[in-house]
Amino acid sequence: PRRDSLTRVKIFIDYQNAYMGARRAFSLHSRGHLDGQIDSRRLGSILRERGLSVDPTRRLEAVNVYRGVPSPNVSPVGHAACERQLASWRRTDGVRCVARPLAYQRTTTTDGRPRLVGREKGIDVLIALDMATGALLDEYDAAVLVSADTDLLPVVERVRRAGKRCEVAAWRSTDGKAPRLTLPGLW
């Protein structure tokens, strides 16, 4: 961190990973889809506050939220809900949304009926690009990655090599099945 000012903290939220992690951690599988939803700005503020014990000069600069968007043709209800969520985040000061359309793959149900399944494609790459670019352009002093996705380990390493602090926040899984994003010898 720079000595002449506050530590600039930027939060990077892998939304689907955080949402599903919350549902696993709090055993919300059988509950409605609203259980596990995250208030991105509030989460950013909580993470900033939690880090005050390590660095009392932390200032939350921005919260970036990354998520896939369902197709209105495949999932009109899911698309509408996602658009409402994105609109809410966009109205929130300090929150930046990065959204990409879901990619769909044809599968079949157990009884043989055709079905389309949506998957996020490119979200991890966008998170990695923004984190690495931000570190190189000195946009922050500390990055907080909200994800347990081990595919993001290389960007955590790159941010650290650029001289920035990089922290990882994720829900603790009670079943022990969720991956854990860590740097060997550091956490």
Image (cartoon, rainbow, N blue to C red):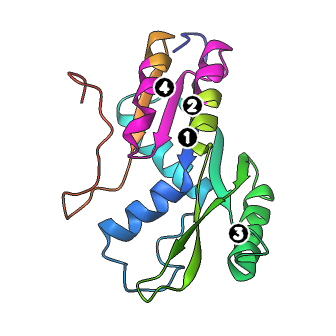
Residue at point 55%, 40% (across, down): 124
Inspect the image, locate mark 4, and give the three-letter code of the amino acid beneath it. Answer: Val
Give the class, few, some or many, for how many residues have Cα within 10 Å of label 4's Cα (few <14, many ≥20). many
Q: Earlier in the sequence, mark 1 or mark 3?
A: 3
Quadrant location of the C terminus in the rendered image? top left
Label 4 or label 1, whichever comes before in sequence order: 1
Q: Which picture quadrant has residue 128? A: top right
The answer to whether marks 3 and 2 mark residues whose Cβ atoms lie closer than 8 Å is no
Residue tagged 4: 155
Please tell me whether mark 3 sits on a helix, a strand or a loop.
helix
**Residue 185 versus residue 56 in the image, above or below:** above
| Residue at the farthest front position | 112
Please state the horizontal and vertical placement of residue 93, each as a whole percent of the image.
Answer: 76, 51
Whole-percent x, y for residue 138 in the image: 65, 15
- Which of the two discs, 4 and 3, labels the residue nearer the N terminus? 3
Give, as a three-letter code, the residue at label 2: Ala
Q: Secondary structure at mark 1?
A: helix
Which residue bears the numbered disc 1?
Answer: 124
Q: Is residue 120 or residue 162 the one in the foreground?
A: 120
Mark 1: amino acid:
Asp
Helix, strand or loop under label 2: helix
What residue lies at 23% left-to-right and 24% top-to-bottom? 184
Per the image, the residue denoted by label 2 is: 128
Residue range corresponding to the magenta coloring: 131-157
Nearer to us in this view, 128 or 39? 128
- Which amino acid, by three-letter code, is at mark 3? Cys
Above or below, 157 against 131 in this view is above
Q: CA distance from mark 4 to mark 1?
A: 10 Å
Q: Residue 2: say if magenta.
A: no
| Disc number placed over residue 82 in the picture, else none | 3
